[in-house]
């Protein structure tokens, strides 16, 4: 009855931080409309994208997420007047920072999904899942967590000398 | 130690078809802190809820997770049930395994695994949930209405009739606003003063209304239910309590030739005056800029002739503080003046229509005064320049309005209708005259409106020319109006005796500074912003403040009156309870960590963050910290994400709860 | 090619600072002056707080006056501002920090008497204090300085600093890193952050790290790993850079005090560059109601949002 489902070698973990009024409701609509999308996403509900702290994104990657989605109301639709406007600036800056330290921004997606856009939710989640699945696991933070000591090389003559003298 | 109960719902087959609910319950039951886990066919049904309540009591559960549909669907249901069983409702969370899982995935294994993870996340979250008591805020059942035009008067009367006290503040010496200036009103052509003045008298006589005319809002403190409003009562130089309104002072005043603003400067008034005969209150005010006594120290005639001794040259501005629970803003509009460009205004002057330069080019309000039976000409349409009756009159619509390149892109809404009315009034008064109207479109939606406009053409012989005026100049005692008729495609030239411009409606000057005092938002034109354009059109985003009339956007009288009653109803709804109850999802400041950088205050869209001084027992200031007023807080949590030290926390969505969920992954 | 930077005005500047400090202390306009004094090593300088006019002669300004003294008004010496109006010697870069602190309600303008310093530059942290100032020995932040003459101070000596156009090292380094692949950048920062020993000197010296309890010290919940391991270090430096975005004006004290020579100001400059490009915002020039990350416009860029 069901079409043959493709089995993949790697199933990424996707975490979605969403606002309750628009995107969470949009995801609900996708459900009530019985749309289908990959089961990789875990949704965390916030009152507003304005509540979403950049630290949560960092934390999610550190906890092993392979991709992170942040989604809220379209500009002007914020239930709390301006939370999404503040979020937009905050994340515009934060993604630049992550990019600069070497996080591949392909793993971090931002979107506006309204309560009426069940289809868009499916599209955003499916696209991100497939993109991250092709990229493979996010190893950077995981490897970092395994490293215990200073990984730097002793590369100055002074340090080398001091080290050899021990 | 938590004793969490997990209830996994089948939702008939909606969930159990793709999610192995028994397995979910079994797996989650093994999680640390979970004391009880079960599955049930319909959790939201009566037996389901009974099961929930019974289990809470029997198993002495500390927290509850219901794994079922979306919390948007049944969170309230289950929190109520949990409360009935004696637990705080905020110790219950829902795990959405229907909309976000069983309905969107087909593979049972995948869906089951995901459901277990979703429920697991919510179990970790609920462990960090705290007891949240419902927040109540006391309500002062008195209301402030700012602006004494038809908007403010209607709102004040409705609220006062409901038995609540109203403080009505009007900037001018009399209430009445623009409606008192109008001659007749569309679409019925009844006399504006005849329907307006009784309402003004009602205000004056109403036992529940305190009227502060010639007063302005100085400062607004507090929040919904608990505002403290400081009102500046400008020095009137006449004691309102003593004055009987006999008018002898006005008769005796030697200065007689001051242009009266009420009559659009066409009529004259003395230095001690009421703006118009039916003014409420009927207490004169001394125009100190033009009074001889104030200019030279001599005269004092009005004081000498005043029987009750009401004239008081020493009077000073007084500040009164009124506690109120709700504020209705009804500050109305100004007409766009095109002969000058106000400082700092984005609106560019027109210039090409000669308003302010050619005396017989007037605006719509000036025409109203000419047409008004109580106006400076006694209702005769006469040219300001030479007092002759104009035989050819041209009306030009959309002056300023809908001119994006000039800075106003909106439609002023009332001009099409009042211009149609003007052509009729003109035709009634000057039988041998001819009215022409240059217009872009006729916008006449409203009950009996289009019929009214058609009548001006079909019965009252107004000639409507679709097109704009390109040039206008004085030639002898005529004004030559050149324009194009785009319907026919020809150039038109009319030698008019008078030109009336339908100028745009703008918010009152100073609307922005009042908004800042009130803490409400406004758009780029300074019109006040409603909380939601469709669903909350009379409320401000700032709780407890309501909008009426043209201060929110161009509006005619029927719309304004409806909105006034709507705002009054909102105020009455607020006043229906002694205490305001609200969901306890509000931000709270942890004062120990707060260093008072007020980033939270900067991002708060509700103005809920205040500065609070912390002092030691000797009264020495230790530090200034943020304080979130729970009555005002909207609960978005933007402050928490902004706070560098996380010293402000949104109850119900604390960092602990969220981090617990992320760590559960 | 090494360029010599003329610092001959510093002697006259020092004298002017001394005279002004003496005057305001004598007149009772301030209760203390925070400035620089000679330290024990030849040519070196250290911060000093003087409360009597007699000590005014101790004040100096030399290329070794590297510290940003703003930190003494917030957390390092919290009791100082409570004693009354304070005089403070500020370079252009330090003034930007004070301006930021005023915008964040940590200081009030009227509490301060600002003695601005015409400054051609100070020495890099790795250079011996009695070295002459050249394009090689100058602190990297001075290469990009746009505030040689601090604006809006209560007193500024009349000397004009000569500041030749120099190669901008941060800008060049940011451009170099931006050109790399994410993997290469990650490798670079991994190397850098791995050196971190979590001594928090960067936090201690930063005028903007004035929180009483740092988010990164909290354990309920533990938002940021606190251990001095690569994972925790990376998290700390990312959070730190984010918290300083839109506030840091580049005094580069974090980088100066870092015992492991992590190029911390590089992160701060990168964020400043982005905020300038995105919102045309530059920190430190005027006391702002709101910084770029606690304000918004409806038309902000959202090209990155689906």
Image: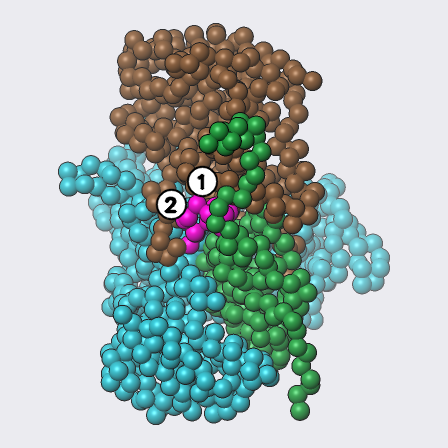
Residue depicted at 65% across the width and 71% down the height: A9
Q: Nearer the viewer, residue C152 or C233?
A: C233
Query: Residue A105 falls in which quadrant of the image?
Result: bottom right
Judge whether B297 appears above or below C103 on screen: above
Instruction: Give the drawing colour for chain A.
Output: green
**Could you say where residue B418 lies in the image, as x and y percent from the top left?**
59, 61
Look at the numbered disc 1 and give the secondary structure of its residue: loop
**Height in image: B593 above or below B106?**
above
* Mark with earlier residue (2, 1): 1
Of badges 2 and 1, the one in the foreground is 1
Chain of the residue under label 2: C
Which portion, as a residue range, is magenta? C223-234
Residue C232 belongs to the span the image colors magenta:
yes
Question: Residue, x 42% and y 35% (percent of image)?
Answer: C201
Note whether B547 is above or below B250 in the view shown.
below
Residue B383 percent location from the top left of the image = 61, 48
In terms of depth relative to the viewer, which is nearer, C113 or B484?
Answer: C113
Residue at point 34%, 69% (across, down): B127
Q: Colour of chain B?
A: cyan
Chain brown in the figure, letter: C
Rendered location of residue A96, percent (x, y):
60, 48
Q: Nearer the viewer, residue A108 or A136?
A: A136
User: Which residue is the site of mark 2?
Assistant: C214
Q: Is residue B60 left or right of residue A101?
A: left
Q: Which residue is mark 1?
A: C197
Res. C9 visible in picture: yes
């Amino acid at each position: 009855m069901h079409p043959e489902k493709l089995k993949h070698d790697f199933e990424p973990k996707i975490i979605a931080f969403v606002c309750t009024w628009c995107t969470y409701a949009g995801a609900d609509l996708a459900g009530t409309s019985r749309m289908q999308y990959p089961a990789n996403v875990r949704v965390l509900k916030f009152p507003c994208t304005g509540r979403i702290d950049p630290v949560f994104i960092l934390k999610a990657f550190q906890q092993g997420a392979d991709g992170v989605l942040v989604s809220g109301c379209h500009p002007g639709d914020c239930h709390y007047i301006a939370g999404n406007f503040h979020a937009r600036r905050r994340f515009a800056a934060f993604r630049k920072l992550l990019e600069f330290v070497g996080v591949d921004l392909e793993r971090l997606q931002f979107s506006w999904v309204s309560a009426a856009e069940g289809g868009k939710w499916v599209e955003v989640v499916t696209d991100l899942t497939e993109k991250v699945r092709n990229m493979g696991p996010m190893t950077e933070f995981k490897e970092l967590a395994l490293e215990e000591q200073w990984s730097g090389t002793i590369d100055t003559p002074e340090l080398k000398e001091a080290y050899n003298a021990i | 130690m938590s004793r969490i109960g997990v209830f996994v719902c089948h939702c008939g087959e909606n969930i159990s078809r793709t999610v192995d609910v028994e397995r979910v319950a079994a797996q989650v039951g093994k999680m640390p802190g979970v004391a009880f886990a079960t599955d049930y066919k319909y959790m939201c049904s009566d037996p389901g809820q009974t099961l929930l309540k019974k289990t809470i009591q029997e198993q002495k559960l500390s927290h509850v997770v219901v794994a079922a549909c979306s919390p948007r669907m049944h969170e309230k249901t289950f929190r109520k049930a949990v409360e009935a069983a004696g637990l705080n409702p905020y110790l219950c969370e829902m795990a959405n395994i229907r909309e976000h899982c069983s309905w969107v995935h087909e593979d049972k294994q995948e869906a089951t695994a995901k459901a277990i993870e979703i429920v697991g996340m919510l179990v970790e979250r609920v462990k960090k949930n705290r007891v949240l008591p419902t927040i109540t805020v006391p309500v002062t059942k008195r209301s402030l209405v700012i602006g004494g035009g038809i908007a403010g008067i209607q709102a004040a009367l409705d609220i006062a009739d409901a038995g609540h006290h109203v403080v009505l503040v009007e900037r001018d010496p009399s209430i009445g606003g623009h409606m008192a200036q109008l001659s007749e009103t569309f679409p019925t052509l009844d006399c504006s003063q005849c329907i307006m003045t009784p309402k003004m008298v009602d205000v004056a006589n109403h036992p529940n209304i305190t009227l502060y005319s010639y007063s302005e809002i100085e400062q607004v403190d507090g929040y919904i239910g608990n505002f403290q409003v400081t009102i500046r009562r400008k020095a009137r130089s006449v004691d309102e309590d003593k004055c009987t309104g006999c008018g002898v002072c006005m008769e005796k005043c030697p200065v007689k030739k001051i242009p009266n603003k009420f009559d659009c400067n066409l009529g004259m008034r003395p230095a001690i005056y009421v703006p118009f005969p039916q003014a409420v209150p009927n207490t004169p005010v001394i125009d100190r800029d033009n009074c001889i006594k104030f200019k030279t120290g001599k005269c004092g005639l009005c004081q000498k002739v005043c029987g009750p001794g009401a004239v008081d040259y020493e009077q000073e501005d007084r500040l009164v503080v009124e506690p109120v629970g709700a504020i209705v803003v009804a500050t109305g509009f100004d007409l766009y003046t095109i002969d000058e460009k106000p400082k700092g205004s984005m609106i560019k002057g027109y210039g090409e229509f000669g308003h302010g330069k050619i005396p017989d080019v007037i605006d719509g309000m000036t025409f109203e005064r000419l047409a008004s039976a109580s106006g400076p000409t006694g209702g005769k349409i006469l040219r300001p320049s030479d007092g002759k009756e104009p035989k050819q009159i041209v009306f030009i619509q959309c002056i300023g309005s809908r001119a994006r390149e000039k800075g106003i892109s909106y439609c002023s809404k009332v001009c099409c209708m009042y211009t149609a009315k003007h052509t009729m009034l003109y035709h009634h008064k000057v039988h041998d005259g001819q009215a022409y109207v240059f217009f872009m479109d006729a916008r006449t939606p409203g009950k009996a409106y289009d019929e009214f406009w058609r009548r001006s053409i079909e019965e009252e012989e107004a000639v409507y020319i679709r097109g704009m005026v390109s040039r206008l100049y004085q030639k002898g005692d005529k004004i030559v109006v050149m324009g194009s008729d785009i319907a026919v495609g020809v150039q038109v030239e009319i030698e008019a005796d008078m030109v009336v411009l339908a100028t745009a409606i703008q918010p009152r000057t100073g609307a922005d500074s009042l908004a800042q005092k009130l803490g409400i938002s406004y758009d780029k034109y300074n019109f006040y912003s409603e909380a939601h354009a469709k669903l909350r059109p009379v409320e401000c985003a700032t709780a407890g403040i309501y909008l009426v009339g043209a201060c929110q956007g161009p509006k005619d009288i029927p719309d304004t009156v409806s909105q006034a009653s709507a705002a009054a109803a909102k105020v009455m709804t607020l006043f229906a309870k002694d205490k305001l109850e609200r969901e306890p999802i509000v931000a709270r400041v942890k004062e120990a960590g707060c260093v008072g950088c007020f980033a939270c205050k900067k991002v708060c869209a509700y103005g809920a963050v205040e500065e609070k001084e912390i002092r030691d027992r000797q009264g020495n200031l230790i530090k200034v910290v943020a304080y979130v007023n729970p009555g005002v807080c909207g609960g978005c949590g933007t402050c928490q994400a902004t706070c560098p030290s996380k010293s402000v926390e949104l109850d119900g969505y604390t960092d602990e709860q969220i981090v617990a969920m992320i760590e559960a992954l | 090619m090494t360029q010599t930077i003329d610092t001959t005005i510093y002697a006259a500047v020092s004298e002017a600072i001394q005279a002004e400090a003496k005057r305001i202390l004598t007149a009772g306009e301030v209760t203390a002056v925070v400035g620089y004094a000679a330290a024990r090593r030849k040519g070196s300088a250290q911060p000093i707080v003087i409360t009597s006019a007699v000590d005014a002669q101790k004040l100096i300004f030399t290329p070794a006056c590297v510290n940003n003294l703003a930190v003494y008004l917030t957390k390092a010496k919290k009791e100082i501002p409570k004693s009354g109006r304070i005089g403070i010697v500020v370079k252009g870069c330090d003034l930007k920090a004070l301006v930021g602190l005023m915008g964040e309600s940590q200081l009030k303008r009227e509490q301060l008497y600002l003695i601005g310093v015409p400054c051609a530059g100070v020495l890099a942290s790795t250079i011996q204090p009695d070295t002459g100032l050249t394009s090689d020995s100058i602190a990297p932040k001075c290469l990009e300085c746009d505030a040689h003459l601090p604006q809006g101070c209560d007193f500024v000596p009349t000397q004009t600093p000569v500041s030749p156009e120099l190669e901008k090292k941060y800008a060049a380094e940011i451009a170099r890193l931006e050109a790399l692949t994410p993997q290469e950048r990650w490798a670079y920062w991994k190397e850098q952050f791995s050196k971190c020993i979590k001594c928090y000197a960067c936090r201690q010296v930063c005028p903007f790290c004035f929180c009483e309890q740092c988010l990164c010290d909290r354990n309920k919940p533990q938002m940021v790993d606190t251990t001095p391991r690569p994972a925790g270090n990376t998290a700390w430096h990312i959070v730190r850079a984010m918290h300083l975005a839109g506030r840091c004006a580049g005094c580069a004290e974090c980088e100066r005090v870092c015992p492991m020579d992590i190029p911390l100001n590089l992160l701060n400059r990168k964020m400043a560059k982005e905020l300038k490009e995105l919102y045309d915002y530059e920190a430190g020039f005027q006391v702002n109601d709101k910084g770029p990350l606690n304000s918004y416009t409806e038309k902000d860029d959202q090209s990155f949002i689906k």
